[in-house]
Amino acid sequence: MATAVSKHTERAALPAKREPRPRTPASSSDAALCLLLVVAVAGVAVQSIELTGNVRLLMLAATGLSLLLGVWSPRMWTAIAAVLVVAGGATVLAYVIATNGGPRFWIAIGGAIVAVLGFGAIWVSSLLRRIYRRMRENRRIIEALTQIDPTTGVFKPHAGRDRLRAEITRAVRYHRPFSLLVGKAKGWEEEVEHRGMQTAQEVFAETLRTATTVLRNNDIIATEPDYSFIVILPETTADGGEIAARHIQEAVQGLLDVQFSLVQCPDDGETEEALLREAYQGLAFAEMTDLPLVSRSAFDAE
C-alpha cells in the first residue's frame, strides 16, 4: 500500500539563529561546594563542642538527613519543606531530651545549622542540575553540528549511514519495511562542466533543501561522497517510495534532473552493504537506460 507523503517542516537539529553563549556557572558551583563544606565542618564542630551526648548525636543525624534531603530533591519546594520539618523537629526533640539547665542556646544554633546546611544543599543541587542541563543542550548542539551539512541542510554521509543502520535493525527486528532511495543528478559531470563546480554545488545544495520540503518529518536525506544522496523512508513500502521519488522529482524541476534507484528492506537486503549494493546497481542501470526511476523489484524482473 502506498504511503502518503506530506509537507515537511524544516528540521530542528540546528537552531534557526545563533544564540548568545551562556555564561558558564562552573566557578559559582565550585564556590558553592566549598562554602557548603566549610559550613558543614563548622556546624559539626559547634554541635560537638557544647551539646550533651544524646543531643549531639540527634543534631548530627538531623544534619546528615537534611543534607541528603537537599541533594536528593525531586521538587525544590518539597525539599525545602522537608528540611524545615527535619530542622524544626530535631530542635524540638533536642529541647525535650535536654537535661534541666542544658545548652538550649546551642540547641537553637544546631537547629539553625541543620536548616542552613539543608538549604545550602538544595541550592548546590539545583545549580548542578542546571549545569548538567546546559551540558546536555551543548552536547546536542555539537552532535547536530557534526551530523548536519550546513550547506545542504541534510545529514552528512556518516550520519546518514548511522541512521540507515538503525532503520535496518528496526525493520528486521520488528518486520516493518522501509524504502531506500538513492538519487543522483542526471549528467552531473556535464552540469559541473557547464555551470562550474561552485555553481553546481550550490544548485545541488538547493536541490536537497527543496527535496526536504516534500518529505515527512521522519524521512531522512543524507549526502553521499560522489554527489549522490540517499533518502530513507521509514514505514514505507516500495509503492510509497515511488510516490516519494516522483514528488521529489517534481519539486526540483528547474534545478537538477534527478534519477532514482529504489530498494525495500528487508525484501532487497537485510544489511547496509546489501541494500546499498542493490541500490547503486539500480542507479547505474537508470543512468545507462536514461530512466527517471528504477525499482529493484522491476530490475530483477527484467
Image (cartoon, helix red, strand yellow):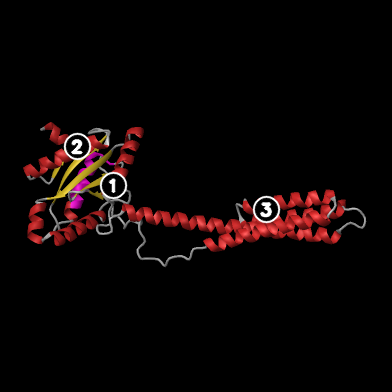
Report helix, strand or loop for mark 3. Answer: helix
User: As shown in the figure, which amino acid type bears the numbered disc 1?
Assistant: His
Q: Amino acid at mark 2?
A: Arg
Q: Residues within 10 Å of mark 2 (few under 14, many from 20)?
A: some
Residue in the picture at 75% in, 61% down: 112
Residue 233 place in picture, x, y as percent: 27, 44
Q: Residue at label 1?
A: 158
- Compared across the picture, whether 43 is left or right of 94 comes to left
Q: Earlier in the sequence, mark 3 or mark 2?
A: 3
Over which residues does the magenta segment extend? Answer: 236-248
Where is residue 96 shown, x and y percent of the image? 87, 53
Which of pointers 1 and 2 lies earlier in the amino acid sequence?
1
Is residue 52 among what the camera can see? yes
Q: Quadrant of residue 265?
A: top left
Tell me, yes or no, whether the two marked residues, 3 and 1, touch with CB atoms within 8 Å.
no
Helix, strand or loop for disc 2? helix
* Quadrant where the N terminus is found in the figure: top left
Numbered mark located on residue 67 in the image: 3
Residue ID for mark 2: 277
Asked if residue 240 lies in the magenta stretch, the reply is yes
Q: CA distance from mark 3 to mark 1?
A: 47 Å
